[in-house]
Image (tube, rainbow, N blue to C red):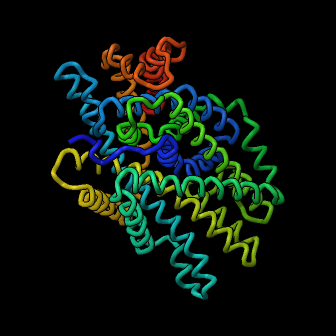
Amino acid sequence: MSVKSSGQFSSRIGFIMAAAGSAVGVGNIWGFPTQAASHGGGAFLLVYVLLIIVLGYPMLMAELMVGRHGQSNPADAMGKLGSTSKSRNIGKAIGFISIVTATLICTFYSILSGWFISFAAAPIAEVMGQPTIANWMTDFSVSRNLVFTVIFMALVVFVIRQGVQKGIERWSKRLMPFLLLMLIAGAIYILTQAGAMEGVKALLIPDFSRVTDPDVLVGALGQTFFSLSVGTGAMMVYGAYLNQQENIGKLTAYVTLTDTTVAFLAALMVIPAMYVAQHNGVQIFADDGSLLNSDTLVFTVLPALFDSIGGISQYVLAMVFFTLMAIAGLTSAISIVEVPTSYIVEKTTINRNKASLLVSAVITILASVIVFNFDALFGLIITLTTERAQPLIALGIAIFMGWVWHRDGLLSAIAQQDGVDENSFFWRVWPTYVKFICPLLISVIIVQLFFG
């Protein structure tokens, strides 16, 4: 059974919104500002933008190209690149690992996004005169984590069960513009507050001495792959839902630009908000200059900022901001859950409805295990998936794209695209770039990551 049985994107804008929705998520609005604030602000931004250009864009394009060529789940799509039984099996293994990685990513993602829903609902409870419920929604507890993880996964299943056009595409086209408008409005509001300009300077003026800092490089690489969903198989699945004539280069550019813009807007809102909070008396830095609560930045600094504003505005701002976060989490989780769902639909006789329920049940159970062993497992799963597995999977994809996929097959796939001259400079250079430069760059950073 082909992944096409699930349908295709009906329009170019539908794909761009869905793929951008996959890329634009918690990694942008929670992860990027947190990483930037923890790793020198402007220095991190500079390294991140550079890595997006030299690694993120070409690797995202490679995943989409592999997915469209394979017209199937990541395991089979990677397997189809091989010309021998051994190479096909290795390709399938890489693709299957990406499916497992996507499933594991969704475990901590569902917990995190559940927090966003609870923090968005808390102001409503407060306004309705239910402070006990509001406190439960914002206090860290096993019960709160479990309840809102289940709620979030239910929302994901609601969309996934409807298929590509009626589910993924329709909801992405609705949610993404709303997310962008809310983000722009939030950034504009924060920038009008006293103290915000200090945050803008911290974000935009790099400390060049930190640009070569291994922690900055590793953090930026992980953020690049996590943000663009590279190495999770999500873009391979979305690539399979594209027709053969779509210009992958242009589509990837639109998605990458949207993703990077959202990450920057999020940082332009969150980091200045930190300094606004500091101006209002909230402590954000420790005595040694390090950032307090870096892992839970948006759950500590921003609520404190909203509280310092007072009045009804604090509740409106809190609800709007965390609703924004929840939408970002939903658009990304949809694509991640689609990865194992598409695999099950293709490989078994289980229909999409049952497959999405099965996948969500497995993710919810695994997430529950993490909730009950939070200190030991939450950070560990994040590290194993986003900082270890995703770069290694990306390395495997680059090697297969450049060295295993027969060049005639690759050139044929390139030539089929509308408006593409396969003899142009870009399309002559890109296969060679993915073959040599991407594996080299990824390998250098992986060595630093594992042995530095």
Give the camera-side residue of 64 and 108: 64
Q: Position of residue 211 (x, y in %)?
A: 65, 30
Q: Is residue 244 above or below residue 304?
A: above
Residue, x 43% and y 61% (percent of image)?
111
Residue 303, by quadrant, is bottom right
Q: In the picture provided, is 205 more to the left or to the right than 423?
A: right
Q: Position of residue 73 (x, y in %)?
A: 29, 40
Residue, x 50% and y 49% (percent of image)?
21
Q: Is residue 268 above or below residue 320?
A: above
Q: Position of residue 26 (x, y in %)?
A: 52, 52
Q: Residue furthest bottom?
A: 129
Residue, x 76% and y 55% (percent of image)?
188
Residue, x 41% and y 39% (percent of image)?
235
Q: Position of residue 353 (x, y in %)?
A: 27, 60
Give the camera-side residue of 34 and 214: 34
Q: In the picture provided, is 195 more to the left or to the right than 363?
A: right
